[in-house]
Image: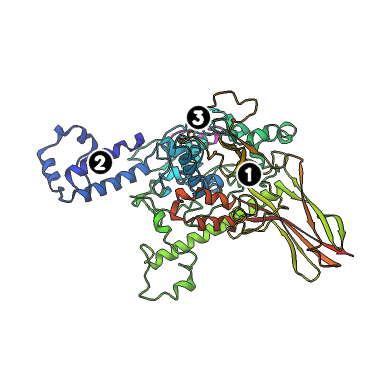
């Protein structure tokens, strides 16, 4: 428990002793010095004594939770959104904001710890919820019970409460603790902030420290310039990952350091991923850094915090993107918003658990649905209130609009990174058709895919139709689970479908050396035939020569900068149906992860009570067709 929660403990102790009054009659200082209580105080306390101690404890804990969430050393992004609405909106739908909410990530982290008997520790999760690890939350708890700032993943304080260059430590870095008034670290410093603080007539009354007797907007007291925040090295802290045993998981930062974008063009990660065009260094937009009250600060360079990537959400739309009015925290009560001169600030609409009961697909809250609801129709609380359902639908409409914007940005980013050439016919006659399709890296900053490339599914889907419109060839099609027909497909492994020998996939492969036999491909980079008590241990000899531990490696299949890979396809006489016009269609498709990974990690369970099939279905539904080309081939 963080030190910020300590005052709430006094409240718990008082309420357990004296019961559940509407307001405690003794101040905290009186709890510390009980001898100062008068006889009248003791008489007043006596009337609050109740018989149901369990109810007392429950109410006390709820109040303590509310106090913890309000006064914590790591504020939620919702508090930052008051003055930074544009930054919050962009961030709320970003992969950073989804980092900890992802059921795939959490199950994978738990599975790896299970395979290594817990010795992997917080190696994975410390990048996905820095706040959660800083406040000592359990590694494998449900997001339904995490602190609000912890489940926000890579939230505001994750980047703007860093004041040291920690280097490539796979996310091992310390956040500067403090409530909303604590100084932050940014690209410029306090120049504009000082102007705002010195002009209360223009921007309103602002508070840089906790003063209960003063009404005003809570704000951070200072903004220090932190040079590394605008450099690629800041991103490299989490985006270049060595496992504890020396296994290299991610190379994004290392690839960038040696790329033409860095060494020739002088660009950095932010130029492509926080600029006005996703994936392209075409400059930045301009806008106010903050809107204080109803007044905007002068325009300056705006860094887009959406930072889209190959990941996308598969969870309930009420939970993601982060929405200011969607989630009601446990123990939360309506509070007086001092920044609005005593107007009651509404809390979230429903808890995360209640949102999971909202049937989005059935159309709850839509006018056409609500008109058909009969008087005896049952809904789970709080959705038995039609006004709640209508309010939820308004929130979901906002969510879908924002998700559509993010999908459009993701599509643009991936189209920049992957380029598809034209179909090149090599041989064509009535009993043989042979052709190739080039796929190129369209960025100068790193390979594609990059990062966690062993779990990035990018492949070519090829169909050929004969002159009568019959499908005579296909590659890159999916099995009933949603996997391509490679060696990791269960249908291929079980002999129910043939191996797709023409498949072009850019997914890298984990290769492990087992105690018995030679090397083998695996979905996770943990050898299965280990000793009876497997655990992560340092290598007993240097691995610098190989750049990897002795027992595992990664077979990279991504495309380097300026690189090209080619899909090669052949149709034999048994597929050719004589002369005529054959139609070849090629699609370049990108997905988040292969479905076989979902199966591999499913035994530890998925958050939000999701089944493996629900997760897999969401993964497949998120596939994007990046490029498509069609060619008519005349066979004579």
Residue linked to disc 3: 537
Which colouring convention does the figure follow?
Answer: rainbow
Reading the chain from its start, which is encountered first: label 3 or label 2?
A: 2
Residue linked to disc 1: 286
Image x and y of residue 316, in percent: 48, 57
Task: Tell me if mark 1 has few (under 14), some (14-19) or many (20+) residues whose alpha carbon lies within 10 angstroms of its own.
Answer: few
Q: Are marks 3 and 1 in contact (CB under 8 Å)?
A: no
Reading the chain from its start, which is encountered first: label 3 or label 1?
A: 1
Residue 240 badge = none
In the structure shown, which secondary structural element does the residue marked by tag 1 occupy? strand
In the structure shown, which secondary structural element does the residue marked by tag 2 occupy? helix
Asked if residue 39 can be seen in this view, the reply is: yes
Position of residue 382 relative to residue 374, above or below, is: above
Q: Does the magenta stretch include residue 541?
A: no
Q: Do the residues labelled 2 and 1 touch (CB within 8 Å)?
A: no
* Quadrant assignment for the C terminus: bottom right
Residue linked to disc 2: 11
The Cα atoms of the two marked residues, 3 and 2, are separated by: 45 Å
Span shown in magenta = 182-193
In the structure shown, which secondary structural element does the residue marked by tag 3 occupy? loop
Q: Are marks 3 and 2 in contact (CB under 8 Å)?
A: no
Q: In this view, does 620 lie to the left or right of 79?
A: right
* Quadrant assignment for the N terminus: top left
Please state which of residues 357 and 497 is positioned toward the viewer in this rendering.
Answer: 497
Please state which of residues 465 and 618 is positioned toward the viewer in this rendering.
Answer: 465
Outermost residue to the top: 541
Residue at coordinates 75% horizontally, 69% vertically from top-left? 470
Image x and y of residue 462, in percent: 73, 58
Please state which of residues 553 and 562 is positioned toward the viewer in this rendering.
Answer: 553
Q: Where, by quadrant of the figure, is residue 521 drawn? A: top right
Task: Tell me if mark 2 has few (under 14), some (14-19) or many (20+) residues whose alpha carbon lies within 10 angstroms of its own.
Answer: many
Asked if residue 326 can be seen in this view, the reply is: no
């Amino acid at each position: 428990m963080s030190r910020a929660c300590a005052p709430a403990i006094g409240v718990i102790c008082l309420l357990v002793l004296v019961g559940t009054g509407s307001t405690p009659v003794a101040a905290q200082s009186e709890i510390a010095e009980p001898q100062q209580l008068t006889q009248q105080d003791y008489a007043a306390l006596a009337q609050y004594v109740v018989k149901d101690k369990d109810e007392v404890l429950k109410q006390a804990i709820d109040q303590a939770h509310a106090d913890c969430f309000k006064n914590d050393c790591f504020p939620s992004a919702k508090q930052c959104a008051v003055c930074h609405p544009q930054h919050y909106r962009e961030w709320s739908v970003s992969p950073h904001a989804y980092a900890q909410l992802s059921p795939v990530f959490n199950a994978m982290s738990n599975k790896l710890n299970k395979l290594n008997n817990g010795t992997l520790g917080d190696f994975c999760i410390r990048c996905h919820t820095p706040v959660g690890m800083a406040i000592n939350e359990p590694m494998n708890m449900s997001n339904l019970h995490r602190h609000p700032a912890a489940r926000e993943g890579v939230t505001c304080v994750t980047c703007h409460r860093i004041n040291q260059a920690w280097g490539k430590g796979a996310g091992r870095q310390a956040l500067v603790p403090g409530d909303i008034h604590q100084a932050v670290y940014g690209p410029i410093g306090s120049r504009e902030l000082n102007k705002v603080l010195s002009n209360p007539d223009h921007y309103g009354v602002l508070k840089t420290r906790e003063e209960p007797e003063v009404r005003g907007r809570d704000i951070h007291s200072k903004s220090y310039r932190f040079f590394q925040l605008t450099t690629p090295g800041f991103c490299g802290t989490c985006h270049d990952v060595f496992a504890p045993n020396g296994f290299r998981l991610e190379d994004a930062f290392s690839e960038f350091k040696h790329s033409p974008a860095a060494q020739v063009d002088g660009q950095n990660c932010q130029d492509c991923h926080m600029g006005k065009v996703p994936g392209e260094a075409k400059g930045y937009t301009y806008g106010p850094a903050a809107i204080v009250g109803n007044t905007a600060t002068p325009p300056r360079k705006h860094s887009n915090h959406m930072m889209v990537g190959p990941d996308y959400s598969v969870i309930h739309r009420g939970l993601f993107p982060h929405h200011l009015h969607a989630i009601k925290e446990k123990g939360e009560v309506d509070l007086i918003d001092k920044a609005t001169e005593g107007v009651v600030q509404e809390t979230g609409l429903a808890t995360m658990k209640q949102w999971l009961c909202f049937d989005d697909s059935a159309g709850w809250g839509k006018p056409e649905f609500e008109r058909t609801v009969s008087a005896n129709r049952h809904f789970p609380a709080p959705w038995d209130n039609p006004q709640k359902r209508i309010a939820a639908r308004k929130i979901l409409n906002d969510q879908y609009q924002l998700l559509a914007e993010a999908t459009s940005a993701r599509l643009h980013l991936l189209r920049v990174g992957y380029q598809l050439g034209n179909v090149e016919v090599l041989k064509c006659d009535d009993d043989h058709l042979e052709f190739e399709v080039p796929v190129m890296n369209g960025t100068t900053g790193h390979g594609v895919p990059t990062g966690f490339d062993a779990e990035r599914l990018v492949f070519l889907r090829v169909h050929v139709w004969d002159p009568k419109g019959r499908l005579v060839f296909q590659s890159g099609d999916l099995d009933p689970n949603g996997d391509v027909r490679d060696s990791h497909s269960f249908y291929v492994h079980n002999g129910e479908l043939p191996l797709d020998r023409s498949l072009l996939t850019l997914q890298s492969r984990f290769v492990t050396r087992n105690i018995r036999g030679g090397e083998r491909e695996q979905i996770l980079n943990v050898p299965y035939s280990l000793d009876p008590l497997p655990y992560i241990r340092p290598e007993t000899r240097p691995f610098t020569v190989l750049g990897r531990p002795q027992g595992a490696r990664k077979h990279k299949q991504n495309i380097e900068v300026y690189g090209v890979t080619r899909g090669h396809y052949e149709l034999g006489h048994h597929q050719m149906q004589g002369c005529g016009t054959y139609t070849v269609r090629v699609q370049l498709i990108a997905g988040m992860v292969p479905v076989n990974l979902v199966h591999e990690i499913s035994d530890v369970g998925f958050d939000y009570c999701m089944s493996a099939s629900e997760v897999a279905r969401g993964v497949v539904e998120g596939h994007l067709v990046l490029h498509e080309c069609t060619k008519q081939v005349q066979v004579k």
